[in-house]
Image (cartoon, rainbow, N blue to C red):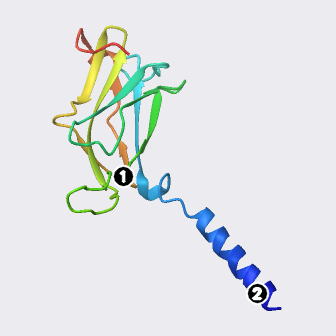
Amino acid sequence: MKKTILALVALSALVVLVGCDPFGSEKTMAYITGTIYSDSALTIPAEGLGVELLVNDDSSAVRTQIAFTDISGVFFMEIQFYPFLPDEESGAGYSLPSTAVVGLVAHNGTTAYWYKSEDEGYVLSAGDTLTVHTISLASFAKGSGGAL
């Protein structure tokens, strides 16, 4: 009987440990979404445009990534927050930042629309969703974007 109870306790502890994943949970993710249209009347969605997340050098908590608009002209990014390495001087363990400074730029061939640069950037908070303003291709400037 004691072995059965001990086995059940051990199994329960294992299930709890396997189910606890602090990375990839809602508290370690942020989201960015927006819509891009082909026309200035905002009636024709722009499909297949690349939207690039630019990361400020001081915000090593997130990684640069690219998302593409779908058939509805909507892009959606899931931004994972990563822990900082332990501080060698203080001996402190890993720490998970709760904010990061990022920029956002949409690309269409040789034209681009800068929502914000990574220097003046958006401050993303873990667990939040940033919905950027709707734009049209008429807002894009020639020669101001980098290559994807």
Q: Residue furthest right?
A: 1
Q: Residue at x 32, y 35 (%)?
A: 133
Q: Is residue 68 above or below residue 39?
A: below
Quadrant in which residue 36 is drawn: top left
Quadrant in which residue 97 is drawn: bottom left
- Using the rendered image of the protein, determine whether residue 20 is visible from the camera's viewpoint: yes
Q: Is residue 95 above or below residue 3?
A: above
Instruction: Write down the residue under mark 2.
Output: 5
Indicate the position of residue 124 as horizontal and vertical percent values. 30, 47
Q: Residue furthest bottom?
A: 1
Instruction: Write down the residue under mark 1.
Output: 83
Indicate the position of residue 45 as horizontal and vertical percent values. 47, 22
Q: Give the camera-side residue of 125 and 73.
A: 125
- Using the rendered image of the protein, determine whether residue 40 is visible from the camera's viewpoint: no
Q: Give the camera-side residue of 101 and 42.
A: 101
Q: Give the camera-side residue of 5 and 16.
A: 5
37 relative position to 133: left or right: right
Indicate the position of residue 80 as horizontal and vertical percent values. 42, 45
Q: Secondary structure at mark 1?
A: loop
59 relative position to 82: left or right: left
